[in-house]
Image (spheres, rainbow, N blue to C red):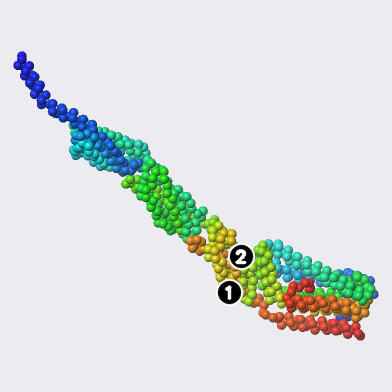
Amino acid sequence: MIQKIMDLLIRPDSFFSEKANEPENLKIPGLIVLIGAILAALAAYQVSGLTARIFSQAATAGMSSIIGIIGAISGLLGFIILWWLIVTGIFFLVSMVFSGKGSFKRTLENVGYGLVPMIFGSFVTLLLSFYYLPMVRVPVVHSIQDPAAMQQAVMQLTQDPSFREFTQVSTIIALIFLIWSANVWIFGIKYARELSLRNAIIAVGIPVLLYIIYMLYTIFAGFPIAGGA
Amino acid sequence: MKAALHATLSVCIALALLFTPAFAASAESEAAAAQVTVTNVTLDPQVFIEGDTGIITVEIANNGLQGVGIRRATLYDEDIRLLSNPYDTATSIGGGNRQKFIFTVLADVPEGIYYPTFSVDFRDAGYLRYPVKLQVQNDPLEISLLDKPDAFSAGVKDEVEILVGNPRDNPVNGVIIYLRGQGIDVIPSSSFIGNLNPDSSRKVTFSVTPEESTTLSIIVDYKNGINSHTETKEVPLTLGESKKKANPILSNIVVSYEGGVYSVTGDVTNAGLEVANSVVITAGEGADPQDPYKQYVVGALQPDDFSSFEITFSAEDVTSIPVLASYKDSDGNQFTSSTSVDVPEANTSNQKEPGIPIPVIAMIIILVVAIGGIIWYSWRKRNE
């Protein structure tokens, strides 16, 4: 199993060429996605804890827990839907331009395998959250009746130096591991959609490149981040 | 015989001559005394209280032309005691003249109506007796507490309104009201009302500043004639929270921390029924106020009115600090209410140094090199 994973990460071309001869199977990719989703959920729970602390004086302890659970569920579903289903759909659609022939299920399987580097990225991000988040100064809101006060508190949280640095570092790390995943995806899409290596690079590279540009723009321009592992 | 009859007649004539002037004079005196009448009786006080000493003045007038001799004049009764001496010196009242007789009496008797008798003993003309109506009534002045705060506060001036009424049938005079109690300061020290007529009343307002719970004695001194009397009413004076006083409430509090300085913003609302003057918001113990908002002066807050505020301070190793809202009432008494506000811990050991830490930068570089190497390796292996 470990040898298989090493092949996937270091020799993705040979890994997917072998997989192309095997029947389509979503069990292992599904397990990979589930592990990645759980790690994303844990990281989201950590960040949601900050939001819960904002309202700790205005809401009950039960409400703080609910905020954390909602954050965790959002992270879990976000990873599965965004990084597996939507990414697969984008690659599938783009590869249609190059007359890709493989099935959506095979594409889904290979994209799922390609999420292994991002699991490592989620793990590193989770470790970083334990370092950065305790240093974040969380503003406290004493009443949830005033939307302006809540908005101001959330704004103060996002402008906290530690929180901003955590956001930037975690985004950079996520992009590094995304590039690694993109490298795996190139070979995965090549075999899943029966494309040439050049077309596979284009089919994977363009969406990933656009996403990287968007993420770099948001973290340096300070706009809210949509998605991210 | 004739001589004897003559002698008898002579004796009778002689006797008649002897007694006729005296007889004629007595009849004449009685006729003159009959012209003497009581014209006026005054009592001071008009209505006595049991134990009171008073003065009864009886005025008589001689309505005839002839003077009338008076041997003695006095006042007597079984219950009402005469303190002054009767008029024992013989005198006379001329025709058309008036004369007053003044008696001091002690009415040490229960409530009721008494009739001491005024008596004049005329010389050679009998007596004049006249019953004088003297009423004894023990109804005291009525003290009513019209208004006072539900609860007094220590060191805070509050008003007490008192009504004094006179249910008696006669006016009383020299009425003075004052308050007494342990540990209280009263303004004015006393209130002089003076005369208080029957069935009338007067309101008096005192400002009371208590220092402790005590019994407030409302004392009314007055005079009924020359007699001093005192009425007292005691009411408990309990310290507590006033139900009407201003009550500044802090809400919508947001605490932020930047550059070693905490900033607390929020709203202060007067949830009381009285105006809160000179409202000032400050950070309490454990906080070191910093510019630009060491204190925030809100000013006057009407009931149900609110204002926003902002204070800035520094604090170390605290999880909460008291935010103090001080205000003054209309008399200048200062009050302070405290609201505990949780703040993020400002432990310097947990403080973020500016810039990305070197270990994190090193980790990013290692990741870039390692992943770059893996990618390069994956392409190299592909070409082999």
Q: Can residue B86 be seen in the rendering of this structure?
A: no
Q: Which residue is drawn at 83% across and 69% down?
A: A81
Residue B225 in the image: state x and y as whole percent.
33, 45
Residue A129 in the image: state x and y as whole percent.
73, 74
Q: Residue at x 31, y 43 (%)?
A: B44
Which mark sits nearer the N-terminus, 1 or 2? 2
Report the side of A213 relative to B17 (left or right): right
Indicate the chain on which mark 1 is placed.
Answer: B
Q: The residue under label 2 is which amino acid type?
A: Asp
Residue B31 in the image: state x and y as whole percent.
21, 30
Report the side of A199 relative to B247 (left or right): right
Secondary structure beneath disc 1?
loop
Instruction: Return the mark for residue B292.
Output: 1
Q: Residue at x 93, y 71 (%)?
A: A103
| Above or below for A172 versus B331 | below
Write down the quadrant of residue B282 in the picture.
Answer: bottom right
Q: Quadrant location of the C terminus of chain B?
A: bottom right
Q: Which of B67 and B243 is in front in this view?
A: B67
Q: The residue under label 1 is which amino acid type?
A: Pro
Q: Nearer the viewer, residue B170 or A88?
A: B170
Report the side of B97 relative to B312 (left or right): left
Instruction: Return the mark for residue B332.
Output: none
Indicate the chain on which mark 2 is placed.
Answer: B
Q: Quadrant location of the N terminus of chain B?
A: top left
Write down the quadrant of residue B170 in the picture.
Answer: top left
Report the side of B112 relative to A6 (left or right): left
Q: Nearer the viewer, residue B264 or A2?
A: B264
Q: Which residue is drawn at 79% across and 81% down?
A: B367
Instruction: Return the mark for residue B267.
Output: 2
Q: Distance between the residues labelled 1 and 2?
A: 18 Å
